[in-house]
Every structure is written in structure tokens, then in C-alpha cells.
Amino acid sequence: MTSHRRYLLVRRPNGTPVAQDFALVTEPIPVPAPGEVIVRNHYASLDPAQRGWMDDVPSYAPPIPLGSAIRASTVGIVHASADGSFKPGDWVVGVNAIEEYSRSGPAHGLRKIDVERMPTPSNFLSAIGAVGLTGYFGLLEAGRPVAGETVLASGAAGAVGSVVGQIAKLKGCRTIGIAGGPDKCARARDRYGYDVAIDYRRKSVAQLAAEILAAAPDGVDIVFENVGGDVLDASLLNLAMHARIVLCGLISEYNSDHGRVGARNIWQLIVKRATMKGFLVRDYSTRFAAGGAQMAAWMAEGKLHIDEHIVSGIDRAYEAFMMLFTGKNQGKMILKLA
Ligand SMILES: NC(=O)c1ccc[n+]([C@@H]2O[C@H](COP(=O)([O-])OP(=O)(O)OC[C@H]3O[C@@H](n4cnc5c(N)ncnc54)[C@H](OP(=O)(O)O)[C@@H]3O)[C@@H](O)[C@H]2O)c1
């Protein structure tokens, strides 16, 4: 094999991405320059955040340059190395791209992983990757749950939300999940242990707020927000005194072509002396090993279910990525590349 395929951003999406915003190209497999490592990617993480990196707007990461492969965390095997700390055959994880082979190295956060530790190497993108650790640190450090409190999470049946609900139960909280459609709600309840699941689809803010009130008459102590828009507005109308809102994601706005919706009921922060705090998982990177060890232990003890939705083939990158926005994914969205 001398060539490989790469999935490039060729045009900045206007609202919802279309297939023509991307191009699948074939190029020679790169040769490592001094200090570089070439990784044969086996799995690439598909994340809502990638949609944000496609826009040329200020963010915590630079926009993906046009003509570059879509930035993604990947798990793979070192194919060739000109860096003494990596050798061919090592399993690694790093911030690379949706491509079959990546130029990588320490500048990409590349690190060796012990794949024997987990049921499958893809778990380094889910349970003990950024997504699992977002649920872990977001709830425990930003939310600070106390036993007996009520935790509400949106995107409850998704990769982050499923972790939040399960850890909240492990900490003795009551849990309310908001998800799209009866199947996702059943999954939130039956698999991820939510005490109540509320379907947000085709409901007004007032209807949603009434359903949350029925589930939590004394108010919600922690809102773990993954969605934003109407869902957040309805939650804001149901805060308990001194509630904490962990602002983790606003996926309902990522494809908006008419600006951001914003939270319209923030007056409730004053009424309830509540706190809303932005959360970014990378701020906890020095503690990923400890968080990952706890997540792995809960999985091994059968206390934590982690689901992955794996789609095979780089030629299916667009189809798989868009499942995040239609809600077709059943678990952490991952593209299998080898
Ligand atoms: N701050 C951080 O460090 C950090 C890190 C990772 C992820 N995040 C954020 O966490 C959130 C969840 O990410 P994830 O990776 O776990 O994805 P995910 O929940 O596994 O998948 C995305 C889900 O979002 C829901 N969704 C999509 N469009 C929606 C809309 N317009 N309105 C309401 N719900 C919608 C869908 O679920 P339904 O079928 O239920 O509608 C979909 O399945 C995202 O907002 C992401 O940006 C933040």
C-alpha cells in the first residue's frame, strides 16, 4: 500500500453541512520527518464539536483550514516513526484527522495506550476518551452532585448524556433525562437508569417546562446542558434554589443558519441565585488518567454501560457524522478506518 484516503473540508458549511462541503481524496502515504510519527488510524471519533471547527469563528481550537482533513481524535497503530519514543506496532491515541494514515507526534497529543486494559481499542475514544471524561468531570467537578439532589441532563441517551445519568445515579441522585423520541427515552430509562425520561420533540417550551415540573416539583439542582435552545429554556423555568447549570454543549444551535438562539430565561438565574458555568473537558487533561481509571473500573464492575455506534469505512464519513444531528446515533459515534 502506497496510498491512502483522506476526508477533507473543501467549503465552510452554511448551516447544515452538505456532502459537497467535503471531498474524499487519495494521496501517497506520508513518510515521517524527524520527530514525526505516521499512524495507521483504526478508529476516528465523530463529535458535534467538529461542526464548530468547520466555521471560521473564534473558538477554543482554530478552524479547520480549507483543504485539510477533518480534525478528529483517532486510535491507531504506529506505522512508521522518526521519534524515539514511538515504534511501529505501538497502539496510540491522539488528535489527528479523518484519514487512513496521519502525520502525528507529541504536538498532536499522541500517546501510547495499553489496549489490553479495555474491552476494545475504540473505548479510548468513548468510555475513557474525551466524551466519557466529559460526562465524568463535567458532572463531578462542574456540577458537584450531592446525594439526594435532582440532576437533569439533555441529550440524555447520547454519548455524554448517558454517562452523566449513570454517574449521577452512582452518586445517589435522582435523574431526569431529555431525549428525542420514544426509543431514545426508553433507552435513557432502561439502559442508562434515568428515573424519568422526557421526549422533547415537537413540544413548546411551556409543554416541556410542565413535564419537567411534574417530574421535579421541587426543582432541579443540576442541569447538565448538551442541547440549548428550547430545551435549556424549559429547564431554566424549573431550577431549585442555588441550582448549578453545567453548560457542556448547545447542539441544537450548531447548524443554525440564522444565528444563535441563546438562553431566553436567564432571569431565572437571579430568581434562584443559580450559577451557569461553561465546561471544557480539555481543562481536566492532567487528570484524564485518574478519571479514565475510575470509568474503566465502573465498566468492569458492570456499573456503567458504554455504547458505541460504529460505522465502517471512510467513504461513509458524511453519513455517519450527520447521524449526530438527526439523532440516529445509538451511542458514541465512531468511524472505523481499518
Ligand atoms: N464541553 C465539552 O468539553 C464537550 C465535550 C464533548 C461533547 N460536548 C457536547 O456534548 C453534547 C453531546 O455530544 P455527544 O458527543 O455526546 O453526542 P451524542 O449525544 O452522542 O449525539 C448527539 C445527539 O444530540 C441530539 N441532538 C442533535 N440535534 C439536536 C437538536 N437540534 N435538538 C436537540 N437534540 C439534538 C441527538 O439526540 P436525540 O436523538 O435525543 O435528539 C443526537 O443523538 C454536544 O453538545 C457536544 O458539543 C462537549
Image (spheres, grey):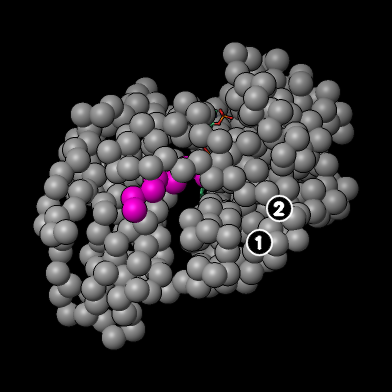
Magenta stretch: dominant secondary structure: strand
Give the SS element for disc 1. helix
The amino acid type, in three-letter code, at marker 1 is Met
**Residue 27, how many percent across, how many down?**
12, 52
Q: Which residue is mark 1?
A: 295
Query: Is residue 302 rendered magenta in the image?
Result: no
Q: Nearer the viewer, residue 103 or 179?
A: 103
Query: Is residue 336 rendered magenta in the image?
Result: yes
**Residue 137, how many percent across, how many down?**
63, 59
Vertical comparison of 28 with 332: above or below: below
Dot placed on the residue nearer the N-terminal end, 1 or 2: 1
Q: Residue at x 25, y 59 (%)?
A: 101
Q: Do labels 1 and 2 touch, CB within 8 Å?
A: yes
**Residue 238, how many percent across, how many down?**
76, 30
Quadrant hosting residue 195: top right
Q: Residue at x 63, y 42 (%)?
A: 161
Q: Nearer the viewer, residue 57 or 109?
A: 109
Q: Which residues are magenta?
A: 332-338
Q: Residue at x 34, y 26 (%)?
A: 16
Q: Which residue is mark 2?
A: 304
**Residue 108, how many percent across, how many down?**
32, 67
Q: Residue at x 75, y 35 (%)?
A: 190
In the picture, the disc for residue 250 is none
Instruction: For the N terminus, give its image quadrant.
Output: bottom left
Q: Badge 1 local density, few (<14 within 10 Å), some, or many (20+)? A: many
The answer to whether any part of residue 40 appears in the image is yes
Vertical comparison of 37 with 178: above or below: below
Query: Disc count in the image?
Result: 2
Vertical comparison of 228 with 168: above or below: above
Q: Nearer the viewer, residue 31 or 141?
A: 31
Q: Nearer the viewer, residue 244 or 122?
A: 122
